[in-house]
Amino acid sequence: MTTPPLQDDPNPNDPNPARSSATLSAFTGQVQRRLGLDTESEAEVLTRATLNEFGKVVSAGLAQDLTISLPPELSAELRAQRPSDDQARSVGRAEFVDAVSGAVHSVDAEEVGRQVEQVLRLLREWLPESDVDRTLEQLPGDLVELMR
């Protein structure tokens, strides 16, 4: 289980790790270490882009439920500004990775795919098992493999 998020972040959308909650720093720090990225800020950009796209492929209700286990600064990305009655949508791995690559530094699809895979695997580790099961049920096969 994760550490409870801090609720008093003065600017939760600021990608400057010095002004982020302890849990956001922990999450992006793990991404940074796993991928060998130069900065935590780079890891945060990748994390936000991945979760934004991820929030678009699961139902709005599930996306809302998943935010409880994550740092509060990532809630908007996971919910992806969608209507509350929005359903899950099916996308392939290539489409998903391509959408993330538009927001990150790398343009190498294979490298971005590896990075997205690590962010989604870390997401899985942060979620309660019941949420992982519900999430995997909604994802198309290509994306299930990214989370495993």
Image: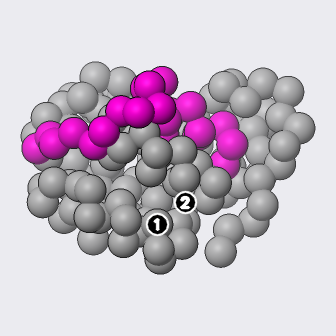
Q: Which residue is mark 1?
A: 131
Residue 51 percent location from the top left of the image: 43, 41
Q: Nearer the viewer, mark 2 or mark 1?
A: 1
Residue 75 placement, left or right of 124: right
- For the residues labelled 2 and 1, the Cα–Cα distance comes to 21 Å
Name the residue at 36% across, 72% down.
133
Name the residue at 75% across, 38% down.
20
Name the residue at 77% across, 45% down.
21
Q: Give the label on residue 71, or none.
A: none
Q: Earlier in the sequence, mark 2 or mark 1?
A: 2
Q: Nearer the viewer, residue 49 or 55?
A: 55
Q: As shown in the figure, which amino acid type bears the numbered disc 2?
A: Gln
Q: Secondary structure at mark 2?
A: helix
- Vertical relation: 83 (above or below) 123: above
Q: Which residue is mark 2?
A: 30
Magenta stretch, residue numbers:
71-92
Q: As shown in the figure, which amino acid type bears the numbered disc 1?
A: Asp
Name the residue at 47% across, 76% down.
129
Residue 145 placement, left or right of 135: left
Q: How would you rate the neighbour count of disc 1 (Cα within 10 Å): few for under 14, some for 14-19, many for 20 or more?
A: some
Q: Secondary structure at mark 1?
A: helix
- Vertical relation: 80 (above or below) 30: above
Residue 7 percent location from the top left of the image: 84, 43
The answer to whether residue 20 is seen in the rendering is yes
Q: Quadrant of the image for the C terminus?
A: bottom left
Residue 41 percent location from the top left of the image: 57, 35
Q: Nearer the viewer, residue 135 or 121?
A: 135
